[in-house]
Amino acid sequence: METKFWELKKNPEEAIAEAAALIAAGEVVAFPTETVYGLGADGLNPEAVAKIFAAKGRPADNPLILHIADPEQIKPLTGGLNANARALMETFWPGPLTIVIPRAEIVPDAVTAGLDTVAVRMPSHPVAAALIRAAGCPIAAPSANVSGKPSPTNASDVTEDMKGKIAGILDGGNCGIGVESTVVDTTSPVPTILRPGGITREMLEERLGAVEIDPALNGNPALRPKAPGMKYRHYAPQAPMYLYEGKQAAQRLAEAALHACKQGMRAGILCDDAVKTRLEGSLRRGHSLEILSWGEGKPDLAEHLYELLRDFDRLAPQFIIGMGVDEKGLGLAVMNRLRKAAGYQILLAEDDCVTVKSGKGFPEFLMLADN
Ligand code: TXA
Ligand code: MG
């Protein structure tokens, strides 16, 4: 299939109208949102929705989010909204929050994967909003990556995964937030975060009072996540990845990187700019490391994380060592993605020693202090 590519800088209204017409005709078009790029189709047309699953190679038991442009559009999609759902819509829409609510009959089983709930979000990105309005239907859209890969946050990453498989790609530049929306189940007695994301736990608690986090998100394989998508291997770069967490994560990562370099290993290092600068100060030119960094704060890490993981696939290091951040605010979402990317191969660097937090089979030099 030929994939049309629209550069929005040139003629945005015309591009959005063409893309919307393709969606209304049952085709799949990728579009930018404030979180990540989405792979959109008419959410009330089961055949169109089936094309999304085919393009992504997505398991059929993983439901999709319906995207709307106006709060009124939610009414026909649901059996009813409780006070928590209403409060969340009023406070956080448009924005990076997805709410899980009881579904109405009209929502195809292909969208809900047969569940009796449906996930709905109203994105704040102007291109996404204009596209939904012009298409005249709720748009079902997962992230626009091939299943299992990091989500795309720019149009060239979408092109890499989707060229030839979908009808078109709207290029709206880089996504601002960089990690997906927060998914909150409002049908449980206490509202529950099924996937941490752009709206933080603290923001939700300020509005709703107590909020729970799905206990399955900590990587315990014995627990089954309530968001079906969270159970899959995800975001994983091709090289094995190890993650340092804890107060001394940055220091230990720097030491491990220098050790790997001395041994001539082609190690990938994922760190903030401060660690990168420090490392480059002690390395000779032509060293063996691939050091990729994200800036300084958690918003920078969120914005660049997927792009950096995809860069590592291009650089193909022997393995990747990364460092974590604390779990406050956006930290919960980025640590969820980083831990999944690392396949839960996690070391804790604290009190001048390194211990295994989860995983096994770590290279020995990662475990030793002062190497
Ligand atoms: O930011 C985002 O949410 C992006 C952009 C494109 O809007 N979309 C996105 O969709 O991340 P996707 O399909 O990659 O992730 C949706 C997640 C999956 O983990 C899925 O299992 C979960 O939401 N989900 C969807 N419907 C659900 C439901 N009814 N109950 C529980 N989880 C649901
Ligand atoms: Mg996804």
Image (cartoon, grey):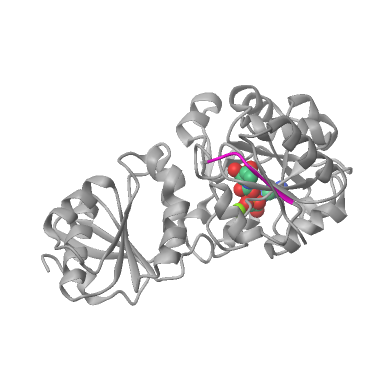
Could you tell me residue 359's position as x and y percent? Answer: 38, 70
Residue 166 vs residue 120, the one in the foreground: 166
Q: In percent of the image, x 40 and y 43: which residue is there? A: 331
The image shows residue 45, relative to residue 87, as above or below, that is below
Could you tell me residue 72's position as x and y percent? Answer: 79, 25
Q: In percent of the image, x 80 and y 53: which residue is there? A: 49
Whether residue 367 is visible here, answered yes or no, is: no
Q: Is residue 309 left or right of residue 69?
A: left
Q: In percent of the image, x 73 and y 30: which residue is there? A: 13
**In the picture, which quadrant includes the N terminus?**
bottom right
Which of the 4 quarters of the picture holds residue 286?
bottom left
The image shows residue 85, relative to residue 286, as above or below, that is above
Whether residue 126 is visible here, answered yes or no, is: yes
- Which is the main secondary structure of the residues drawn in magenta? strand
Residue 305 vs residue 78, the one in the foreground: 305
Which of the 4 quarters of the picture holds residue 131?
top right
Task: Give the extent of the magenta segment.
Answer: 168-173
